[in-house]
Image (spheres, rainbow, N blue to C red):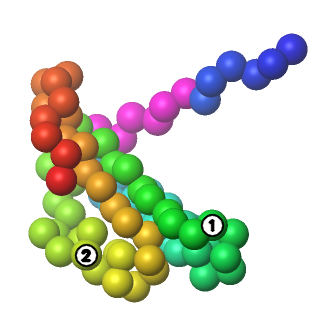
Amino acid sequence: MTPGPKKVRRLGGEPAKGVEKVKADVEKIGRYLEHEACRSGYVIAFEECDYGFGRDFAAKAEAESGCQVRFVRVMNGERASPS
C-alpha cells in the first residue's frame, strides 16, 4: 500500500511557531547546500497572517546559508502576490 500525501500543518494561529519553523528549514537546507547534497535550495513559506518576518529576512537567510526564501501571503483563503 502506497502512503498518501503528507498532511499540511497549519500554523496560522501561532505566528511565533511559524517563524521558528521557517528558520529551522532554512538552517536545514543550508546544511544540505554546505555539504553539496544539492546545488540550490529554497524554502517557500505560506503566510496566513503577518508572521512578523523582517523585510530583510530573505536576503539575510540567503547571505548566511545560500538558501533562498520566498513568501506567499494568503489572506482570507485567497493567494496574494508572492515576495
Q: Is residue 74 above or below residue 64?
A: above
Q: Position of residue 82 (x, y in %)?
A: 19, 46
- The mark nearer the N terminus, 1 or 2, is 1
Residue 13, by quadrant, is: top left
Asked if residue 14 is positioned above or below residue 52 in the image, the reply reads above
Q: What stretch is highlighted in magenta?
A: 7-13
- Residue lying farthest to the top in this orientation: 1
Is 56 positioned to the left or the right of 12 in the image?
Answer: left
Q: Which amino acid does label 1 sit on?
A: Cys
Q: Position of residue 42 (x, y in %)?
A: 44, 59
Q: Within the magenta stretch, is there residue 9?
A: yes
Q: In this view, does 53 lie to the left or right of 27?
A: left
- Residue at disc 1, secondary structure: loop
Alpha carbon separation for disc pair 1 and 2 = 20 Å
The answer to whether one can see residue 39 in this image is: yes
In the image as oriented, which residue stretches furthest toward the right? 1
35 displayed left or right of 82? right
Where does label 2 land, which residue? 59
**Residue tagged by mark 1?**
38
- Name the amino acid type tagged 2: Ala
SS majority, magenta: loop
